[in-house]
Amino acid sequence: WAATQQRLYRVRPDRDNKHFVWQLEAAQHVKPQRRCILVCLQCAYIQGTIEPLGFSTDRASLGWEGFVIRHPEQFKSEVDHLLPDGCAEHSVNNMFRRAGLVAEGGQWDEAWRGLVPFVKNKSLGKVNKMRSSELRVTST
């Protein structure tokens, strides 16, 4: 994950977006897998592959309220590049779940086709809030 994260950081095209800067600062102390998801979402947004439902200061969901996939094949291809070959679909879903984003109503197939949004996982609640309360975001 660390190597994937470094590759993504090099190609990340928008270093001036205030939401993205905050998200990356807030994610400094999370696992590399979650940071990879974050940068992948940022790149997909810039490319128009996904449409955000809004941004927040909630570290549990990496600062995203949710998103809708606008170009499913392209987004899935980008996500697949994060993973080793032959990674099962449920593993990809779990990766997003651990990043604080889930398919609305548990409709994963529909979410990957862009029919329902990925939304903030409200069930993470207290566990992630306790962890995130320890994080300090520094200003640049």
Image (cartoon, helix red, strand yellow):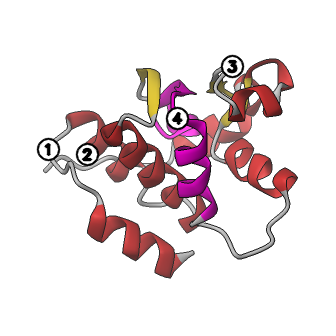
Q: Position of residue 68 (x, y in %)?
A: 56, 24
Q: What element carries label 4?
A: loop
Amino acid type of the residue that numbered disc 4 sits on in the rendered structure: His
Please give the residue where the numbered disc 1 appears in the rendered image.
Answer: 16
- Circle 2: is it few (<14), some (14-19), or many (20+) Cα within 10 Å? some
- Does the CB distance between marks 4 and 2 fall below 8 Å? no
* Placement of 43 over or under 72, stated as above or below: below
- Does the CB distance between marks 3 and 2 fall below 8 Å? no
Please give the residue where the numbered disc 3 appears in the rendered image.
Answer: 115
* Placement of 17 over or under 39, stated as above or below: above
Amino acid type of the residue that numbered disc 1 sits on in the rendered structure: Asp
- Circle 1: is it few (<14), some (14-19), or many (20+) Cα within 10 Å? few
For the residues labelled 2 and 1, the Cα–Cα distance comes to: 7 Å
Depth order, front residue of 32/86:
86
Q: Residue 21 carries which label?
A: 2
Q: Position of residue 97 (x, y in %)?
A: 73, 42
Relative placement, left or right, of 20 versus 35 is left
Q: How many numbered marks are there?
A: 4
Q: Is mark 3 on a helix, strand or loop?
A: loop
